[in-house]
Image (cartoon, rainbow, N blue to C red):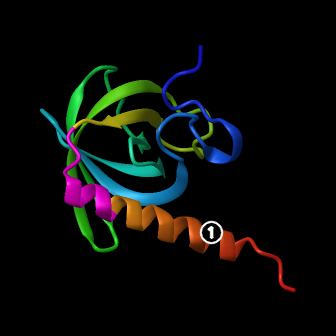
Amino acid sequence: MRGAFGSGPKGSDGRRGRRTPVDLEASLGGRAPRRARVVDLSLIGCLVRAEAALARGAVLDLVLELPDGPLRTKARVAEASLDGEAPPGPTRFLAGLEFLALAAADEVRLRAFLEAETKRRRVAHTPPA
């Protein structure tokens, strides 16, 4: 059985959202707020890289630093693991987060960001004519 954030064809998670590779700053709130990097993002959740392990099932305050300003939401840790692909240095962890309370206006902002990022990546990877 594949987890909620297992990759499928062309970055799609096979569910409600297409995953887009990104590199965004984020902060994870809770008892001990911490910084993280978002490495992929969809309308239903994201994959973050953090220096501390996150407990599966934990509900956190998530702040994503989008170009037009911070996006704040609640998120649940759906999957968590050691990051085996991290560069040498401090141990890093990966966590798949599921958005729980994404406001309608924030969903519109997130959708616009994802569409723009997908177009930008497509253009960047198009060979010259």
Q: Which quadrant of the rendered structure holds the C terminus?
A: bottom right
Task: Give the quarter of the image for residue 107.
Answer: bottom left
Q: Residue at x 57, y 65 (%)?
A: 118
In the picture of the structure, the residue carrying the numbered disc 1 is 121
Task: Name the foreground residue: 6 vs 106.
Answer: 106
Q: Quadrant of the N terminus?
A: top right
* Quarter holding residue 44: top left
- How far across and down, in percent of the image, does residue 113 sit? 41, 66
The outermost residue toward the top is: 1
Residue 72 position in % (x across, y down):
20, 53
**Relative to 26, is 58 above or below?**
above
Count of numbered tags: 1
Question: Seen in the image, is 37 located left or right of residue 7?
Answer: left
Indicate yes or no whether the magenta region holds residue 107. yes
- Front residue of 67 and 49: 67
Whether residue 91 is in magenta: the answer is no
Q: Residue furthest bottom?
A: 129
For the point 58% across and 74% down, the residue is 120
Majority secondary structure of magenta residues: helix
Q: Amino acid at mark 1?
A: Arg
Which segment did they paint magenta?
A: 101-109
- Percent across and percent down for residue 56 are 34, 20
Residue name at image x 19 percent, y 51 percent: 103
- Residue 126 in the image: above or below residue 28: below
SS at circle 1: helix
